[in-house]
């Protein structure tokens, strides 16, 4: 490998390569609404599942699940695009923050759509849709809890905040009612909604989503980075400062001056996770793989080369 330290030239090159990946993901997102007729996604839409009353599911539960995949894929592309943009400027922490968001979005797609091997291609439809329902409940529940907390600190609480909190809690119950109608086991309580959700579903943590997204990489550095990225994202500066002092030998730090190598490691990991998630979407929806195959030939070798140089330099 080169003995020259990575600089803005390589950072700009990585950014341009990542843009090609982003464009491929956006192109794929544009096809999700109309999966190919012989795809797993279309088979899911044509399902013959019956609800608790004996009536057919119909298309809504599956299309809602698939729309969650679509929204997450757009978020994935947006976060990766932001990562590439931040590589073009001399910004210390931005690439790590956006890389963390990118990897979590990729992990969420792979958790919702586990296609890591041939056996998982036939994973039960109910399991996939159940995961989507579980995430919907959690998101709505968190929103309801946040609105209730806002109303609690206002004196007096604004009527519109109280109504929004009530509407949010009603929405949680609505989705739980739908899940029950579809023959999922649910549990409910009153008040805090702390334990409301789908029984038997343990939603993954951020660490687990990261592990899911990066599990295909044969690079021994992946496990250590999420904690550092989280420290940056959540501004836990004591842990972050200790890391930087160990790395730089500095007693006091003004600007931390993260290296180009550290930024490219983050960007490379995020890009690899995003491509792996795109592969899962292509398989499930039966998307045109032309843009993805072009990445293998024209882009990904350059990204991997820069990434491995960055890993090597970052370890010195």
Image (cartoon, rainbow, N blue to C red):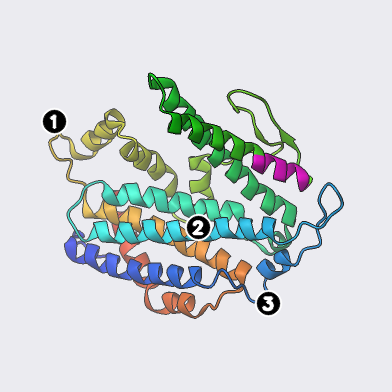
Q: Earlier in the sequence, mark 1 or mark 3?
A: 3
Total of numbered circles in the picture? 3
Within the image, what quadrant is residue 35 found in? bottom right
Residue positioned 41% across, 28% down in the render = 158
What main secondary structure does the magenta stretch of the protein show?
helix
Image position of 150 with respect to 20: above or below:
above
> Going by the picture, which residue comes out furthest to the front?
159
Instruction: Write the start and end of the magenta stretch as one range.
Output: 174-182
Residue 87: image location, x then y, percent: 25, 58
Residue 17: image location, x then y, percent: 32, 70
Please give the label number shown on residue 37. Answer: 3
Q: Earlier in the sequence, mark 1 or mark 2?
A: 2
Residue positioned 34% across, 35% down in the render = 234
Image position of 266 with respect to 122: above or below:
above
Residue positioned 60% across, 23% down in the render = 191
Confirm whether residue 114 shows in the render. no
């Amino acid at each position: 490998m080169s003995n020259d330290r990575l600089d803005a030239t390589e950072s700009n090159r990585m950014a341009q390569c990542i843009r090609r990946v982003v464009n491929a993901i956006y192109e794929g997102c544009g096809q999700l609404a109309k999966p190919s007729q012989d795809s797993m996604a279309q088979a899911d839409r044509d399902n013959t599942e019956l609800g608790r009353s004996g009536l057919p599911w119909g298309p809504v539960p599956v299309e809602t699940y698939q729309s969650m995949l679509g929204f997450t894929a757009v978020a994935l592309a947006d976060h990766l695009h932001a990562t590439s943009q931040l590589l073009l400027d001399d910004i210390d922490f931005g690439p790590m923050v956006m890389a963390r968001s990118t990897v979590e979005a990729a992990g969420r797609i792979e958790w919702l759509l586990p296609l890591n091997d041939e056996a998982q291609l036939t994973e039960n439809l109910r399991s996939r849709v159940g995961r989507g329902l579980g995430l919907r409940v959690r998101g709505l529940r968190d929103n309801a809890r946040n609105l209730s907390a806002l109303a609690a600190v206002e004196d007096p609480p604004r009527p519109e905040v109280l109504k929004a909190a009530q509407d949010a809690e009603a929405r949680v119950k609505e989705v739980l009612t739908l899940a029950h109608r579809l023959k999922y086991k649910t549990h409910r309580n009153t008040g805090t909604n702390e334990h409301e959700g789908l029984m038997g579903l343990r939603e993954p943590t951020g660490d687990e989503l990261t592990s899911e997204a990066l599990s295909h990489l044969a690079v021994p550095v992946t496990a250590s980075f999420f904690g550092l990225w989280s420290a940056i994202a959540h501004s836990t500066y004591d842990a972050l400062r200790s890391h930087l002092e160990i790395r730089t030998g500095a007693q006091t730090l003004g600007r931390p001056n993260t290296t180009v190598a550290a930024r490219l490691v983050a960007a490379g990991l995020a890009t690899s996770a995003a491509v792996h998630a795109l592969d899962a979407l292509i398989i499930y929806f039966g998307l045109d793989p032309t843009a993805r195959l072009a990445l293998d030939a024209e882009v990904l070798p350059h990204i991997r080369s820069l990434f491995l140089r960055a890993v090597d330099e970052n370890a010195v």
